[in-house]
Image (tube, rainbow, N blue to C red):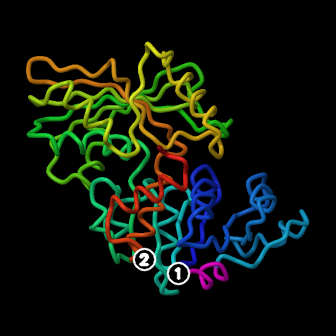
Amino acid sequence: MLRVGVNGYGVIGKRVAQAVSLQDDMELVGVAKTRPDFNAQAAVDKNYKVYCSIPDNLGLFKEKEMPTSGTIDDLVSECDLMVDCTPGKIGAQNKSMYEKAGVKAIFEGGEAGSTAQCSFNALCNYDEAIGKDFVRVVSCNTTGLARTIKPLTSLGKIGRVRVVLIRRAADPGESKKGPIDAIVPVTKVPSHHGPDLKTVIPGLDIVSMAVSVPTTIMHVHNVMVETDISRDDYAEALRNTPRVKLISSGDGFRSTAEVMEYARSLGRGMGDLYEIAVWEDTISAKNGELYYIQAVHQESDVVPENIDAIRAMAGLESDAMASIHKTNSTLGIK
């Protein structure tokens, strides 16, 4: 049984911890928190062992009478692999701690690709992560693009990919972030999403642009691809692609609000949608170009990728599709 710890118990960390606890080939040792906030209390309420990631803050946990099982050093010493879900750039600082302890580690998309030996998406490059000590799971947006562009590369030749990303401004629990009444362009062109995608689909010719809008629900991607692949062939490929769900405005999916309402009705933990939702009625092909629109639940789509990365790194499963199907089964992904 592989012993796994999670450093950082926020939006992604709490979901990864829950997913690890559902697997029969790995054990959640515990989670690390900087301070005794409501997320730490939730971990205690779920009977997870909580460790203090800043030793000087142990007194804060004692003041709150919140039980801890030690410091981050204790957690790392008890694990075979750590999933670092700390805020961007903190993971890179933590890497030396994992190296010193001889523990494998996964980093999230907020870290630079150079932090790890490879970036990761289960559908695109599972084999590359097998046996690695340090792996970075690409961001929520990159994960969404990887899942729907990879099938295109398998169907036939594609040329330039153009993507306009309409990004949520903040996650639902981040009350101090904005914008509130503005649309904010990412003025760097291309945005980092296109180059990031090439870390798991090498050689892809992609240009990405992005704006942030006042919503917390999901990201939306408008994708345009130079290709002669037909609309029907692509739609059929998506039906057979893991972690992609075709939806239609005719079925009531008029916006991201309905998509997430559907997700909540599935009864999964935290009302998550692990799949990338593609509006089938937006898929169209004309004059050598293919178009479609998709939605990404930024809080959860990378969670199954973390589980597959754990299996690859630890040598628990050598076949990508076998790991994907096992993870999907445990998380209720059909």
Quadrant of res 222: top left
**Left/right of residue 325 with respect to residue 70 in the rendered view:** left
SS type, badge 1: loop
Q: Is 105 situated above or below 121? A: below
**Left/right of residue 334 with respect to residue 12 in the rendered view:** left
Q: Is 60 situated above or below 273? A: below
Mark 2 residue type: Ala
Question: Mark 1 near mark 2, Cβ–Cβ under 8 Å?
Answer: yes
- The residue under the point 60% across, 61% down is 22
Which residue is outermost to the top?
Answer: 250
Instruction: Say which of 251 and 10 sits in front.
Output: 251
Residue pointed to by mark 2: 314
Binning the other alpha carbons within 10 Å of mark 2 as few (below 14), some (14 to 19) or many (20 upward) gives some
Instruction: Say which of 34 and 277 sits in front.
Output: 277
Q: Is 247 situated above or below 44? A: above
Is 179 magenta? The answer is: no
- The residue under the point 72% across, 72% down is 51
Residue pointed to by mark 1: 80
Residue 238 x, y percent position in the rendering: 30, 36
- The residue under the point 31% across, 37% down is 188
Residue 204 x, y percent position in the rendering: 17, 46
Closer to us: mark 1 or mark 2?
Answer: 2
Q: From the image, give the main secondary structure of the stretch colored magenta.
A: helix
Mark 1 residue type: Asp
Residue 291 x, y percent position in the rendering: 24, 24
Quadrant of res 21: bottom right
Mark 1–mark 2 Cα distance, whole angstroms, equals: 9 Å
- The residue under the point 77% across, 59% down is 46
Image quarter (top left, top right, bottom left or bottom right) of the N terminus: bottom right
Give the magenta range: 73-79
Is 77 magenta? The answer is: yes
Residue 236 x, y percent position in the rendering: 26, 32
